[in-house]
Image (cartoon, rainbow, N blue to C red):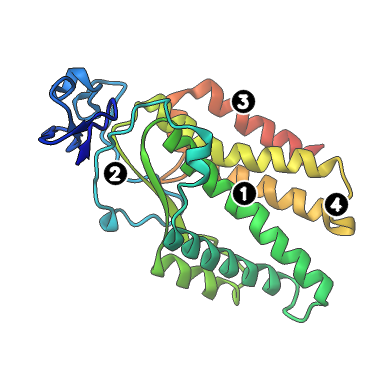
């Protein structure tokens, strides 16, 4: 027996909304009765198919309207929302970034340094991506991390080149977020890197490599705050120039301290 996606009531003959494709009971089958995301329009709302990081692949995204009530997703639900195939994609992406770090240190590293660089790979990339995913889900959007073959190949090849490119995948979202929601979702990634840098800078967690770890996080935050193309900065700027400017200048200031 199906359940109403608004109130959770079990119904034998559910109604399907033609705007968001959700199933509802007779009481909530009208769009205005279930806060239908498919009806939201206006200057502050845009139909968005993908939340991209550098090297997003828009052509691979399937648009599936969100039917989750905005702001009602519990933290416990977020923590259990990572599926096995998504975890596999994140693991492969992290290992590709690990190869980047090994290349920076000349490939032949001690076991201790190798483990430290693996931790670097996890902490500089995974929290950034999960922040995008969890914030999008908190606002009722469908979100998952997706590995892209082209981006993964570019990332691996760059480990052999002087210029490194980190773009193995991105978080894809579907729904109809406002500019504010899209901006907040975009801001969450760089903000995690900034907080990571500030916290680790007050410790000696990585010994002589602590400053190196801090600099990596600051570079990742600064790069993603550039307001161009598919980077986070463009979405933040479209939402709020003041917030983008504060974050951008604050990141530069941390470099100078």
Q: Residue at x 68, y 31 (%)?
A: 250
> Exactly how many numbered labels are in the figure?
4
| Mark linked to residue 46 | none
| Mark linked to residue 205 | 4
Instruction: Mark yes or no: residue 74 visible.
Output: yes
Quadrant where the N terminus sits is top left
The residue to which callout 2 is attached is 49
Measure how far apart labels 3 and 4 are at the Cα level.
28 Å
Q: Which residue is drawn at 26% across and 57% down?
A: 59
Q: Residue at x 13, y 34 (%)?
A: 14
Provide residue 15's location: percent of width, then percent of height. Answer: 11, 32
Up-down: is 66 above or below 85? above
Could you classify mark 1 by the number of other residues whose Cα lies within 10 Å: few (under 14), some (14-19), or many (20 or more)?
some
The residue to which callout 1 is attached is 220
| Mark linked to residue 246 | 3
In this image, 32 relative to 207: left or right?
A: left
Q: Mark 3 or mark 2, which is nearer to you?
A: 2
In the foreground, 136 or 68 = 68
Could you classify mark 2 by the number of other residues whose Cα lies within 10 Å: few (under 14), some (14-19), or many (20 or more)?
some
Could you classify mark 4 by the number of other residues whose Cα lies within 10 Å: few (under 14), some (14-19), or many (20 or more)?
few
Pointer 4 or 1: first along the chain: 4
Provide residue 249's location: percent of width, then percent of height. Answer: 65, 30
């Amino acid at each position: 027996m199906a359940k109403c996606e608004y109130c959770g009531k079990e119904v034998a003959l559910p109604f399907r909304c033609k705007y968001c494709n959700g199933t509802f009971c007779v009481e909530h089958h009208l769009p205005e009765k279930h806060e239908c995301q498919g009806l939201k329009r206006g200057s502050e709302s845009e139909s968005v198919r993908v939340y991209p990081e550098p090297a997003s692949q828009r052509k691979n995204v399937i648009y599936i309207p969100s039917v989750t009530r905005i702001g009602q997703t519990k933290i416990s639900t977020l923590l259990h929302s990572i599926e096995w195939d998504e975890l596999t994609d994140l693991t492969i992406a992290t290992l590709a970034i690990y190869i980047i770090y090994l290349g920076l240190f000349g490939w032949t590293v001690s076991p201790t340094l190798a483990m430290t660089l693996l931790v670097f790979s996890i902490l500089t990339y995974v929290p950034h991506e999960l922040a995008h995913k969890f914030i999008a889900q908190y606002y009722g959007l469908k979100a998952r991390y997706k590995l892209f073959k082209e981006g993964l190949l570019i990332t691996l090849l760059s480990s052999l080149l002087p210029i490194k490119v980190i773009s193995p995948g991105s978080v894809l979202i579907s729904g109809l977020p406002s500019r504010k929601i899209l901006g907040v979702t975009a801001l969450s990634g760089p903000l995690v890197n900034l907080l990571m840098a500030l916290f680790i800078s007050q410790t000696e967690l990585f010994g002589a490599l602590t400053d190196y770890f801090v600099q990596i996080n600051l570079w990742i935050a600064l790069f993603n705050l550039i307001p161009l193309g598919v980077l986070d900065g463009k979405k933040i700027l479209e939402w709020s120039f003041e917030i983008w400017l504060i974050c951008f200048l604050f990141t530069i200031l941390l470099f100078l301290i």
